[in-house]
Amino acid sequence: MIDFIFYAFVLYIAILFLRDLYFVLNPSAKKRFLESIQKEKERKDALAQQARPSFKEEERERLDREERRTQNELDRIMIRDADQQSDPYTYEIGQHANEALAIRYGIVNQEKKLKEGYVRLPASGRLSRQPLKDKIWYENSNTIRLKKTRKVKDDMYEVILVDYGNRTAKAIIEKGTEYVKTFYPLNEDWFERHAQLEMVLKGNGAFTLKELAKFHIDKTVGV
């Protein structure tokens, strides 16, 4: 192996020597050779320059992307804060508003959770998906999709709960926020007619949303 490398090196040196000798005897050939190398370099540089956007192009593309992001954000905020919305918007919601929705409307705002089930095959040791082994449970949702239909007063809006049979409700949403603070009943006399229900259930952490919604149905439906 070492001999092969040595002979290859000697051959390389010999080729360089013969080339230089040829150029000494033929200066014009050397000139053409150097010119061809320079032209090839210029050609590669030109191709690389064409393939790479110029600084101005890169800057313009960056500014365009920022402008689109800014405009998209402005459009989103405009939709969020509109008194009337043509499409549903997803707002954040906390425990208080979820409880108010359950007590005053009998609606349980929860989301389905799934942990996929697998079993390990004895022969291969590979995990195999087994839907019968799935674990399913529900958690109180921290978002809710609704559509404003009109402004009632101040921060109160009449809304459509698009994920709950398009039921109508009254929501308190402060302008400039992503948050539903609470839900008010549709009828003004709710608090008078169901004062005891409100007193017992509101802020009572002992009940789940499902239980609160059941109280609403048991105590108010048909009353």
Image: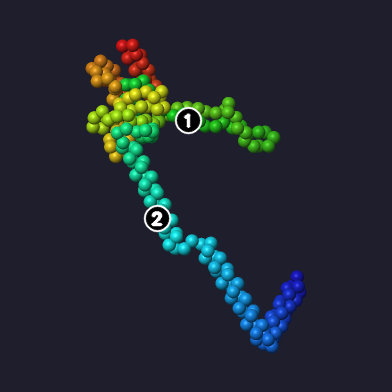
Q: Secondary structure at mark 1?
A: strand
Give the residue at mark 1.
Answer: 113
Quarter of the image where one finds residue 91: top left
Q: Say above or below: 182 vs 213.
A: below
Q: Amino acid at mark 1?
A: Lys
- Graded by Cα atoms within 10 Å as few (under 14), some (14 to 19) or many (20 or more), the crowding at tag 1 reads few
From the viewer's side, name the closer residue of 176 and 3.
Answer: 176
- Is residue 216 positioned above or below 156 on the image? above
Image quadrant in which the C terminus is located: top left
Residue 183 is situated, as x and y percent measured from the top left of the image, at 30, 27
Look at the numbered disc 2 and give the secondary structure of its residue: helix
Q: Residue furthest top?
A: 222
Residue 210 placed where, x, y %? 39, 22
Q: Nearer the viewer, mark 2 or mark 1?
A: 2
Q: Position of residue 156 (x, y in %)?
A: 27, 30
Where residue 43 sits: x, y (%)?
A: 58, 70
Kindly identify the amino acid type of the residue bearing the numbered disc 2. Answer: Leu
Instruction: Decide if residue 206 is in sight here.
Output: no
Instruction: Say the numbered circle drawn on residue 63.
Output: 2
Q: Look at the image and tell me whether residue 58 can be seen.
A: yes
Gap in angstroms between the C-alphas marked 2 and 1: 41 Å
Looking at the image, which residue is at 39% across and 33% down?
87
